[in-house]
Amino acid sequence: MRKKSIWLMGLLALVLVFSGCSKNNNGSAATSPAASGAASTAPVSSSASASAAETSAKVTDKTFTMLTDSNPSWPYSKDWPVWKWIEEKTGAKFDVQLPSGTLYDALNLTFASGTLPDLIFMPDRTQAMKYGQQGALANILDYKDKMPNFQKWMEQYPDVAKSFLAADGKMYMLPTEGFGETNRVVWMYREDIFKKNNLTPPKTYDELYDVAKKLKALYPDSYPIVFRNGMNAMINFASNFETNAAYYKNDAGDVKFGPSEDNYKTMVGYMNKFYKEKLIPADWLTLQTKQWQDLLSTSQSFITVDYIGRIDFFNAALRQENPEFTMAFMPPPAGLPGGKQQNPYTQIVENNLAIAASSKNIDDIVKVFDYYYSEEGRTLLSWGKEGETYTIENGQKKIKPDYADSSDLRKKTGLATNGTYTWIDYDAHLSLASKELKYAYEEARNYDSKFNPKPSFTDSEYETITIAGAAIDKYRDEQISKFILGSQSMGDWSKYIDGLGKLDLPKVTDLYKTALERTAQISLK
Amino acid sequence: MTLRTKWSKGKILFAMFIPCLLYYLIFKYLPIFGIVVAFKNYSLYRGVWASDWVGLKYFRLFFSGDDLWLLLRNTFLLGFYNLVFGFAAPIVLALLLNEMRLRVFKRFVQTVSYLPHFISNVVVASMVIVFLSPTGGLLNRMLESLGIGSVNFMADPSWFRSIYVLSEIWQHVGWESIIYLAALTAIDPALYEAAGIDGANRWQKIRSITLPGISPTIIILFILKVGSMIEIGFEKVYLLSNPATYASADILSTYVYRTAMVNGNFSYGAAIDLFTAVVSFVFIYSANLLSRRITGNSLW
Amino acid sequence: MNEKKISVFSIVNLLLLTAVALATLYPFIYMVAVSLSGSNYVLKGMVSWFPRGFNLDMYKLVLQDPRIMHAYVNTIVYASAGTLVALVVTGLGAYALSKPEMLFGRGFTVLIVITMFFSGGMIPTFLVVKEMGIMDTLWAMVLPGAVSTWNLLIMRTFFAGIPRELEESGKLDGLSDLGIFARIVVPLSGAIFATIGLFYAVGLWNNFLNPLLYLRDPDLFPLQVILRNLLLAGQAGAGDLTAAKGGDSVIVEESYKFAVILVSTLPILCVYPFVQRFFVRGVMIGAVKG
C-alpha cells in the first residue's frame, strides 16, 4: 500500500517534470536550433581529424532532474550560458532542484522520501559510497562501454579514478580532476617586512624558530607565526615532518597513524617551543578567522599557513592603504634534519554528481557525461567558448578581461559550478590570477607531497571506524593540545602512546590497511 | 461523580481540547514510530521498516564505551549548574525590574535585555571567544592593566562550565524574565497598599507578596527545567569547547554529534537520545512528585 | 532611616540594571557599527563603538537581492498566521487542561509531557507531513508548530490562577465553558496571551528547520532561509581547513554577516515594546471587584 503510493507519487513527479520541461521548451525552442546550427558550422576543431569519440553529435534530447547546490558567491541561474553550451553539444537539459538549506539535509530528506532525481550532487565521497552500497545509486563502471572518453580518462588518471571506488569495487559518483588546485594549502610570509629587516624565509624549522625570534625581538607585541582552525591545522605541519595527522601510507608502504610516530613528536616539540616563547598566539587553539585576519592585516603576525588563494585576498584588500604590503608564497620549512620541504597534499575535490539507480535515463546520462571527460568537453567546460569567454594569443588560451576573477567568471557564465564539470583545466582559472598567485601556484608544485589515497569502507567497517576512530581522534586532539600548551610534559609522551594502544588503535589501523589494499587490487579494466 | 455526569459537565471543555489533541496525535504520536530506529540499523534509503533489526546493539556499544562516566558526569554537572544559576537569574531580573520606579528606564532595560536572545549561537560563541582571548581580548586587557596578568580562559577545562553558564545567562536572562513579568501583572496592587499601611519594608513585601504571587509560575518552570536539565543542545557547547577542554566540555550531545551525526549513523544517535529521554523523564517525574508533596503545585 | 535604606537599594538597583543594559546592548551596538563601516577598518579591527568609514554598501548588498522583499512578506504571513493559529489552539487546550473537571485531564497532561522527551525524530515527522499533502503550503508552516508543550503548560498555569469566583459569575449568567473562556478569561489574560504570542511569533520568525523540511518552492521561502543561505557562503569548510572543498569558499566579511543578522532580526525586535503595553497590573483584580 505504502509502496504503491510512493510509486504513484514518483509517477506524478515525473509527469510534472515533463510537463514542466515542455513548457520550458517553448521558450527556448526558438533559440536552440539556431544555436546548434552555429555550433555545427563553427570550426570547433577540424572534424575530420577528430577521433570518433570526440565528435559531439547530440546524444540525447531529454531533460534530467538534478539536485545540486547553489553557492551564494555564484548563485545558480538557469540562464547561465554554460547550460546552453552543454545542450548544444550533448542535447541534455537539466531541471535543477536546489535545497532550501544545506545539501546534507536535503540529501537525507531526498533519500528518506524515496523519490530521487536523476542526478544528485554528493557533497563528499562518503555519502556517495554509503547510499551507493545501499543500492540507491548507479554503478558508473557498469556503463563504461558506452563511455569511450571516460575509459581514456581513467587510463590517464588511474589513481584519481580508483579513489572514487567504493569498498565493493563499484563507482557511485562521477570522478573529478583538476579543480583540487584551489584547495592547495601553502606557507605564506610578509615579504615586505622580511626585506625591510634583512631576513630570509626559513628553510628548516630551526631557521623558522630563529626568524620568528628575531621578529619577536623587533616587534615585541607580535606573534610572528599564526594559523587558524586549532588542532585541525596540525595536518599542515605534520607533512613538514614527513608524517600525517591521521592514518596514512608511508613511503615504505606501511599504514601508520601519524600522531603515534616519533616525527610527530618532534613536531609537537617545536609547537610547544613556539607556544612557550609566544611565537604563536596563546589562543592558537581557538583563534577565530576574524582574529587571524586581524593579526595578519595589522602586521602583528608575519607568517601563516592557509589556502593559496589568500595571497590575493590579503594583498588586494591591504594595498589600498599600504602599497608595500606583500603576502608572498613561502616554501614549506623542513622539520627533520636533512628532511624534505613539502606541503600536505590537499589538492583534491571529492564532491560531484551521482546517478540515481532508479533513474529511467541512465543510458542517456552516461553518454552526456562521457562528453565531460573528452578533451573537447574539458576545454569547453573549463574555458567556455572561444571568442565569447576566452581568446588565444600565441597559442595560449586566455580568459577575456571581461571577467575580473574566477568567481566573477563562475558567477557570469556558470562555468566550474556544480554539475557543469568533471574534468577541469585549472589554467583557465590561473589565467585570471594575479602575478603573485600564479607564481605561487608554479612554485607550490615543487613542494607536493605524495598523493595519499583515501580508503573506502564497507558499512560495518565504517561503523567501527566512526565509533572507535572518533574516540582515538578525541584522545589524540586532547593529548596533543595539552603537550603543546605545556599542561602536560613532553616526558609523558610514552604514556600517551600507551593510551592510544588501549583505544583499539591497532584494530582501526588494520581496517585502514585492509581497505587500502582492497582498493589497490581492483582493476578498472 | 460518575463518568457520565462528568462527561455531560465537561463535554464542552473536551471539545475545546480537541484541536490540541489532534495536534499531538498527528504531529507527535504518529511519527513516534521513528523510535524503533534505535533498535535497527537504519538506512534512510531503505526506510524505517525495511532496515534490519539489531536489537540492543547500539545501547551495548554506548554502555561499554570508555568515556561513558566522564560524559554522564560532564552532562549532569553542566546541566546542574545551568539549572541552579540559569534558573534564578531571570527571576532576580524580573524582581529588580519590578522594583524599578523609573518607568522609562524600566521599559528600556526590559527591551534591551532580551536582545541577545536573537543572536545565533555561532555568533555568540565567537563573541565570547574574542572577548576572552588572551591576544587582545577585552577582559584580558583589563586584567593586565590591573596587574593580574592574562588568563587563557578557553584552553582551561576548569573555566569551561562557568563560561558556558554565564554566556547562557547573558543570552537568555532577559527573554526568560518576560514570563515572570507577565505573571507579576496578576498580583493585586491592593495587597501592596495594605502591606505598606502595616509598615512592611520593601524586602518584606517581596517575600510575602511578590514571590508567593508568582510562585506557581516559578514552580512549573522549575519542574520543566529539571526535565530538560541534561538535554543540553550540542551547538553552543561544541562551539565553545576545544580539545584542551574536553575533560569538562565533552557531554552526551557533543558525543552524539561526533560519533553519530557527522557520519550519518542515525541509529546510534537515536539510541543515545532514547537513553537521555528516559533519564530526563525520570527527572521530571520525580520533580513533579516532590513538588506535589511539598508545594501542592504540579504538572499533573 | 527607612528612607535612606530605600534609596541605597534604588541606587544599587539602578546600577545593576544599567550594567545589564550595557552588557546586553553592546553587542548590538558593535554589530551596527561594524555593518556600517568601511571594510578596511573592519579588517584591521578598528571598529568598536561607532562606524568608521560610514557606508551603506552591505545593506545595499543584502537588500538588493530580488528575493528579499518577497521573503519578508512570506515571513510576515507565516509568523502572523502561525501565531494566530497557535494562540487559538494552545489557548483552548490550556484552558481545558486547567479545569479540574476536564475529562482525563491528568492523563492527557502526562501524554503531552511524554512528547517533550520521546519523539520519532525529524524524518518520520517529515514523512507524516508529506503524506498529509500539505508540503509547499502555508499549512506546512503553521500546523507542525501549532502547539509548544512548554507554552501550553505555562498558559495552563496562568489560567489555573484565575479566581474561581469570576467564572462562577459567568456560569450564573448562563455562559458555557466556551463562553466563559471567550468573554471572561481571554479579556483578563492580555499579558499571558501577549507573552505567549510573542514566544510563538519569535519562534516562527526565526524558524529555519520547518521551511527547510516542508518547502520546495523558492517563491515560498521565508526570510531566514534566504539570509542563512547568503551566510553559508563563508561557512562551508570554515571549520575545517582540510575539508576537500574549502579552498574556494570566500571569507565572509564581518560587516556583511552583521548586516544580514540585523536585517533579519530588527523587525521582530520591534514587537516587544508593543507587547509591554499588555503588562498592566491589576486588570483582573478590578474585574473581580467590579
Image (cartoon, rainbow, N blue to C red):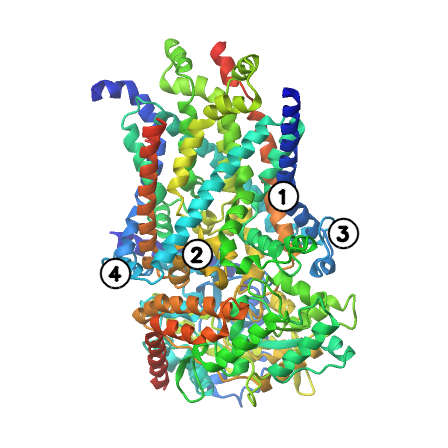
| Pointer 4 chain | B
Label drawn at residue C23: 1
Q: Nearer the viewer, mark 4 or mark 1?
A: 1
Q: Which chain letter matches label 2?
A: A
Q: CA distance from mark 1 to mark 3?
A: 25 Å
- Distance from disc 4 to disc 3, alpha carbons, whole Å, reads 60 Å
**Which of label 1 and label 3 is nearer to you?**
1
Q: Nearer the viewer, mark 4 or mark 3?
A: 4
Q: Quadrant of the N terminus of chain B?
A: top left
The residues tagged by marks 1 and 2 sit, at their Cα atoms, a distance apart of 57 Å
What amino acid is labelled 1 in the image? Ala
Q: Are marks 1 and 2 in contact (CB under 8 Å)?
A: no
Q: What residue is pinned by disc 2?
A: A19
Marks 2/3: CA–CA distance: 51 Å
Name the residue that disc number 3 marks.
C54
Q: Are marks 1 and 2 on the same chain?
A: no
